Image (tube, rainbow, N blue to C red):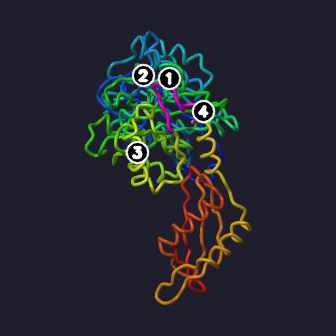
Amino acid sequence: MSEEGTGGPLPVVAIVGRPNVGKSTLVNRVLGRRAAVVQDVPGVTRDRISYEALWNGRRFTVTDTGGWDPKAEGLGASISRQAEFAMRTADVIVFVVDSQVGATDTDLAAARILRRSDRPVIVVANKVDDERSEANAAELWSLGLGEPQPVSALHGRGSGDLLDLVLDALPEAPREQPEEGGPRRVALVGRPNVGKSSLLNRLAKEERSVVDSVAGTTVDPVDSLITLGGEEWRFVDTAGLRRKVNTASGMEYYASLRTEAAIQAAEVAVVLLAADEVISEQDQRVITQVIEAGRALVIAFNKWDTLDEDRHAQLEREIERDLSRIKWASRVNISALSGRGVGKLADHLRAALASWETRVPTAELNAYVRQLVMETPPPARGGRAPKIKYVTQADVRPPRFVVFSTGFLEAGYRRFLERKLRERFGFHGTPIDISVKVREGRGNDKRG
């Protein structure tokens, strides 16, 4: 998560190169954590994925791309487009070459394009694990892009020097500032095989995501710009979450981490549930992830047109029982296959985002809470009833409230406050957070 006060968009570093040269391993080395999908199979990273990085006090965005191949066809061609897009939009390009293999025809073709770029390019000779391998790195001067930097992404050798070079090459501000009021970011999430890719293709009116009846076909998030309800939205289609992340196999494990990253990167999440199946623990876990990330929430029930009367009645009972904690969530019934109800999504997204960004004026907030407390005061603890002195809204996206009280407020009373705030000010489609700051006496503050 980014810190507050970073001051707008961050400069972008794109990691490019042909498949299986170690781009994702280098990204993980830069980030200091295993965020990119890394597996010893060429071409695991199919689309560009962005992460926030920090080095020597400077924040920047690292974009991991699919392998660049100018002669690729089909899926490979789309990966090449992803990489070329990253090159066009980056502030610094890090071109990764496998020093053990040397410069291939693909590397030379990529270098010809990069030499025409007006962006700084740093050549990384990867897989230089010891001093004897450095001679291989020197041969990459032949690419005509300056001095190759010997690095072992796997072991960390030379990565600090590389990051120093990256920082030196970064501009003070990003070259391409995102437009104000750009497309809102929507994460499309849910357990495997509930129809996420089918819904995305229905929205995009094209085969944008790989759709297969095998659960978990989508490995990486795929950004799609989609016009819906007369407005452009940026949808991210994510890999379905597995039952238990820690028991999933390698690629699935990191793909599920990316699903979490997609929720974090989004402003609003559409959680897709299969209306013809029982609401499961997996569904509940996805919803919890969205709430814990503090994102606006729309619940979409897919395959709604397949329900008979019995299943419809059963589903309503399941919703009442299993989704009672999120009665505030926006809910829409759709069919990705036929398109029924899909057009209504835009209104639900807008309403949820509006609530997510709502700020209540302090005077109005306190006048309402004072009246509320007079009618229903907090229950006493240890013979003393706490008094609520003041309430303030500390933040939006999502709305966060701080209650200043003379004593601890029971969880039940906090839920009562949340319910009443929702009744009075809306907040339909967004989680809200209420924390209590206890002030028992002079100089004695405690967080509740």
**Residue 25 appears anywhere in the view:** no
Q: CA distance from mark 2 to mark 4?
A: 27 Å
Residue at label 2?
Answer: 67
Q: Residues within 10 Å of mark 3 (few under 14, many from 20)?
A: few
Which numbered disc, 2 or 4, marks the residue that appears first in the sequence? 2
Tell me the mark number nearer the camera, choosing from 1 and 4.
4
Three-letter code for the amino acid on which mark 4 is drawn = Trp
Q: Are marks 4 and 3 in contact (CB under 8 Å)?
A: no
Residue at label 3?
Answer: 313
Residue segment shown in magenta? 333-344
Tell which of 54 and 82 is nearer to you: 82
Q: Are marks 1 and 2 in contact (CB under 8 Å)?
A: yes
Q: Are marks 1 and 3 in contact (CB under 8 Å)?
A: no
Q: Quadrant of residue 125?
A: top left
Q: Is residue 25 left or right of residue 420?
A: left
Asked which secondary structure carries label 4, the reply is: strand
Give the main secondary structure of the magenta stretch. Answer: loop
Magenta span includes 223: no
Residue at label 1?
Answer: 83
Three-letter code for the amino acid on which mark 2 is drawn = Gly
Up/down of 74 relative to 393, above or below: above
Q: Is residue 308 left or right of residue 423?
A: left
Asked which secondary structure carries label 1, the reply is: helix
Q: CA distance from mark 1 to mark 2?
A: 7 Å
